[in-house]
Image (tube, helix red, strand yellow):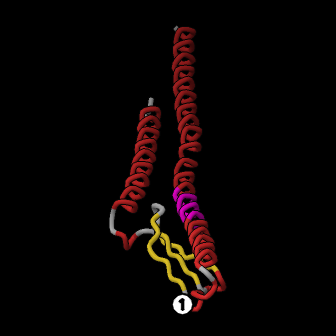
Amino acid sequence: MTNDSFTAAASLDELLTRTQQALSSMRSRAAEQLDGDPGHLLRAMGTAAGGRVRAVVAQGGRLESVAVDPELAGVGMETVCEHIVVAVNAALADLDAQVSASARADVDALAARLGGLQEQPVRQMELFSRAMEDVVARLNRSGDAGTRADRLA
């Protein structure tokens, strides 16, 4: 009998371990981005009033900057504030899209790894089944040889 069943279990265990490591790595990378170097954070810019109001936001919901063209001074403070709100909301929407795309990429990578997990047990069961068929065939051959020897004696 071969060690195919033991190999199958070891391969499955290894695949599960690698998947858990990938998840852990993804989690720690996300945490590092939020707490780590601000240069590595995702950023987005939103505009309003034909580009005369610009807002920049960073991952984690931080507002980094707001720039207002001085020519808007004559439209009134309330209108300028409305443009700022529009620019900040546009920047936040863009940032949400970037974060979602980044998360999708991580999920796609994990799904590819898990796809292997789904196929692995089928292959391992096929190997185990073949090994068992070999054992049964050997037992049958041994039994047939013993029966023939009894008839000749």
- 57 or 21, which lies in front? 57
Residue reaching furthest to the bottom: 71
Asked if 64 appears above or below 125 in the picture, the reply is: below
Please give the range of residues in magenta: 96-106
To which residue does mark 1 refer?
Answer: 70
**Nearer-the-camera pick, 69 or 20:** 69
Q: Is residue 104 above or below residue 129?
A: below
Q: Where residue 70 sits: x, y (%)?
A: 54, 90
Which residue is rendered at x = 52% and y = 26% of the image? Answer: 135
Up the image or down, 65 lies above or below 71; here it is: above
Q: Is residue 148 magenta?
A: no
- Indicate the secondary structure of the residue bearing disc 1: helix
Seen from the viewer's position, the closer of residues 46 and 148 is: 46
**Residue 92's image quarter?**
bottom right
Q: Position of residue 147 (x, y in %)?
A: 56, 12
Residue 108 coordinates in the image, percent (x, y) = 57, 57
Foreground residue among 116 and 103: 103
Label 1 crowding class (10 Å Cα cut-off): few <14, some 14-19, many 20+?
A: few
Q: Is residue 26 above or below residue 117?
A: below
- The amino acid on which the numbered mark 1 sits, given as a three-letter code, is Pro
Please tell me whether the stretch drawn in magenta is mainly helix, strand or loop: helix
Q: Residue at x 54, y 58 (%)?
A: 103
Quarter of the rendering occupied by the N terminus: top left
What residue lies at 53% left-to-right and 18% top-to-bottom? Answer: 145
Give coordinates of residue 112: x percent, y percent: 56, 54
Q: How many marks?
A: 1
